[in-house]
Image: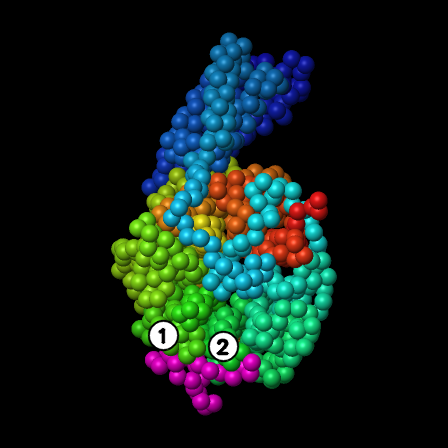
Amino acid sequence: MNNESKANISKGPSRDTSPPVIAWLTILFALLAGLYLLTGGIWLVMMGGSPYYIVAGIVLLAVAWLIYRGNGLALSLYALLLIGTLIWAVFEAGFDFWALAPRTDILVLFGIWLLLPFVFRLFDVSARRGGAVALLVCLVLTGVALAYAAFNDPQEINGKVVDNAAVSPAQPDAHPGDWTAYGRTQAGTRYSPLTQINQDNAKDLQVAWTFQTGDKKGPNDPGEITDEVTPLKVGDMLYLCSPHQILFALDAATGKEKWRFDPGLKTDPSFQHVTCRGVSYHETAAAAAAKDEAARSALPACARRVILPVNNGHLFEVDAATGQRCAGFGSNGDLDLQHLQPVTTAGQYEPTSPPIVTDKIIVMAGSVTDNYSTREPSGVIRGFDVETGQLVWAFDPGSATPNAIPDDQHTFTFNSPNSWAPAAYDAKLDLVYLPMGVKTPDIWGGDRTPLYERYASGLLALNASTGKLAWFYQTVHHDLWDMDLPAQPTIADITDRSGNVVPAIYAPAKTGNIFVLDRRTGTPIVPAPEQPVPQGAAEGDHVSPTQPYSQLTFRPAKNLTGADMWGATMFDQLACRVMFHRLRYEGPFTPPSENGTLVFPGNLGMFEWGGLAVDTDRQLAIANPIALPFVSKLIPRGPHNPIQPPENSQGGTGTEAGIQPQYGVPFGVELNPFLSPVGLPCKQPAWGYVAALDLKTNQVVWKKRIGTVRDSAPIPLPFKMGMPMLGGPMTTAGHVFFIGATADNYLRAYSTDTGEELWRARLPAGGQATPMTYEANGKQYVVIAAGGHGSFGTKLGDYVIAYALPDK
């Protein structure tokens, strides 16, 4: 500082100079920021990272010294730092606003601070004018670059769906106004032929009715409590379940409750999930033929029935008209799915997804607790008689004889690979398609035999009447990352470029790949060649030398680098870069390690249980991939990490994140999202997109960020960054698709033609569910469950909300 400034710091505020506290705060910020960047930058460079932070730290320390001296050259030097940072940032990240912002935000704010009159007076008159001009110019240039980046998003693809004569005509739909299965039909398309709501009028949607279930998180529930239900609509009734599997029947036009059935689920904190994605529906031929109220009222009890899976390992059937138990099914409407299981601890086997139901058979699979131990229930898939509940067949994926049914002195196989996501069904082929997981524990596989790997992490096709194997296609070999198939596959007949109709099935994977197979044989339609992957498994394990990479994919085009690390400021971005370089990461399928492995795509997956929405008339798929890395760290056994569970263990951890014991194998594991010290994702946005795929060409037509930080940031600002999601899209013949799912509490409508957002509605809680649509009394409704998601962190609630166009 000049002598006058020094004197004023000693003497206190002066009319012509800045108060001492302003001077010292300015110096202190530059000094501390410089020391942080220099120290962290040296650490980063030692690990092979960018030298920028060392340079920036040295410059800021020099600026702090010049400010102390009152030398106006501080402004010029700071201007040089700002413009140099901008050039470096554009070189690293291009003109991506959310990548540029953390590299420049603090520097811009401090630059503005230096030009404020009460700070500007700190500097001697001789040098401050030129420095001020230089700094102002650099601030303007930085502002222009950020403004340009804000309106030119390099991550988005702008295109338009063009229909052509190759599109096959719409197939006849017996019940266009209904939604009779989880994916509307058991083909899993999530596509409705309704057109009343379209691109022109979707902006006018308003709340038609709201229903509250009253089912909320209780004191004995785990953190992983979720409301993921997609309701069914049959006739004039809506059927849905709440997180504790309470089944509700509502009037479809008004949302008024008709009846409810409570299975009496009792949970405890060891349950890994408390959730219900939906229920299934079945009717007899006579019930299907009944066209009027008189005919329906003459039907016997349970001619129309709702099938309800419950998280304690039970399956209920109730009369769709009255909610009374179907007495002839199981034991008074209750079927015990724990029968013949090797472990019957409540909560370790959880059917969270609705089963496939054919004319005669209920095909039932279920979730098994991830990463708890080597002594867990079987992931056996079973076929039960739809009217009596009698076991007709079994397929135990870990058994040498999968179709063998044990006698009462034996059980199904411990830890057989399970199928927790919804399945799809082709009635013409009588084939059921099940997305398969891996033998748990998931993150170490040295104990797995070839039998355990035979039907793991892939798509399994079984004859629905007999349970006999039709084919299996493996999408991940020796899965060490929990990269199972997490979503209902979608059945669609696609007309290729040559005009041939191809009977396809689409299986979205956590890896971001979409595997497209001939559903008759399992043969790939879109090539998925094997490619080498990183090697070097943990002690006692191995890694498959190659993995299949579908050519239809949303997987990252390149591996992550330090330049992809993010933060709200340059300070936490530097921390993320250091954290990134400390982890093992060599691209997808980098093996888990004791040091910690960056898993990207992450354990949450690029696709989750929401799946695809496929407009089979236009041969168009709507997808909502996410991009959020995770970190897995193997924990060797030791005094505080025993290989066997304690005697008083309840049998689960109550969550899929954090420390997972993996009892029975040499390592526990810690699984968490890759977050900065302040809790933000370390990978730069976007973390979530919506996109359209032309299924004739397998090309992405358009791709847009979805979601804001309104409900995630400390200050509720609606910045559109592209948020993580849990849930899926639903699309219609009105060229509109709907999606909730995001970490902000909205239901949105988009144009399927362009990806333009047409409408959004604020939800009272998180919308981590897939919406559906139906027609009642000539009006089209769109319904979503807004109940939130415990571990995802959205607001919990108990709402079911219907939207419709206003009456004319």
Q: Helix or strand or loop: what does disc 2 sit on? A: strand
The answer to whether 390 appears left or right of 404 in the picture is: right
Q: How many marks?
A: 2
Q: Position of residue 557 (x, y in %)?
A: 35, 45
Residue closest to the eye, 90 or 505: 505
Badge 1: how crowded within 10 Å, few (<14), some, or many (20+)? some
The answer to whether 62 appears left or right of 806 in the picture is: left
Question: In this picture, is 516 found above or below 343?
Answer: above
Specify the quadrant of the image occupied by residue 20. top right
The answer to whether 90 appears left or right of 31 in the picture is: left
Residue closest to the eye, 369 or 563: 369
Residue range (magenta): 387-414
Q: Helix or strand or loop: what does disc 1 sit on? A: strand
Question: In this picture, is 215 found above or below 681?
Answer: below
- Mark 2, residue position: 361
**Which residue corresponds to the image point at 42% horizontal and 35% vertical from the top-left?**
154
Q: Position of residue 786 (x, y in %)?
A: 63, 55
Q: Quadrant of the N terminus?
A: top right
Residue 403 forms part of the magenta stretch: yes
Q: Is residue 726 visible?
A: no
Q: Quadrant of the C terminus?
A: top right
* Distance CA(mark 1)–CA(mark 2): 16 Å
**Which residue corresponds to the image point at 36% horizontal and 70% vertical from the top-left?**
455
Q: Is residue 129 visible?
A: yes
The amino acid type, in three-letter code, at marker 1 is: Leu
- Mark 1, residue position: 469
**Which residue corresponds to the image point at 63% horizontal and 15% vertical from the top-left?**
17
**Which residue corresponds to the image point at 61% horizontal and 77% vertical from the top-left?**
303
Q: Position of residue 585 (x, y in %)?
A: 35, 51
